[in-house]
Amino acid sequence: MARHCSRTGCSEAAAVTLTYQYAVAQVWLDDLADERDPHAYDLCDRHANRLTAPQGWQVRDRRRARSQLSVAGAEPYVALAV
């Protein structure tokens, strides 16, 4: 069974798994995990790409497709503080 985006009202296919840790104020975006994890959120590409973190938190984008872009000169991680 295909997994869908965890965002309320979104029926798009999940493409990214979001995890976070309060203690270090970080959010991680990874390629979709093989199995659903009750402590993680599955997001579609649209919602993952629009993600912002709370002030003082960092977003670490560890998706393979993103890290491959770094070979072409893009940053491998996105760190946001909003």
Image: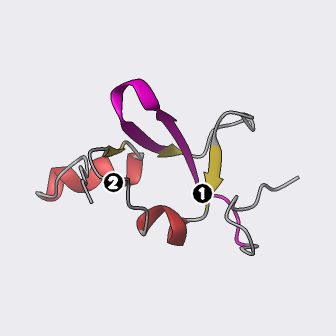
With respect to residue 56, does 6 lie above or below?
below
Residue 41, image x and y in percent?
Answer: 64, 47
Side of 8 where 40 appears, left or right: left
- 74 or 42: nearer the viewer: 42
Residue bearing mark 2: 66
Q: How many marks?
A: 2
Residue 65, image x and y in percent?
Answer: 39, 53
Residue at the extreme front of the image, as rendered: 55
- 18 or 74: nearer the viewer: 18
Mark sitting on residue 43: none
Question: Which picture quadrant has residue 27?
Answer: top left
Residue drawn at x 23%, y 47% is 76
Residue bearing mark 1: 15
Residue 6, image x and y in percent?
Answer: 70, 58
- What segment carries the magenta color? 12-29
- 81 or 67: nearer the viewer: 81
Residue drawn at x 88%, y 52% is 1
- For marks 1 and 2, give the CA distance: 13 Å
Q: Residues within 10 Å of mark 2 (few under 14, many from 20)?
A: some
Q: Is residue 27 magenta?
A: yes
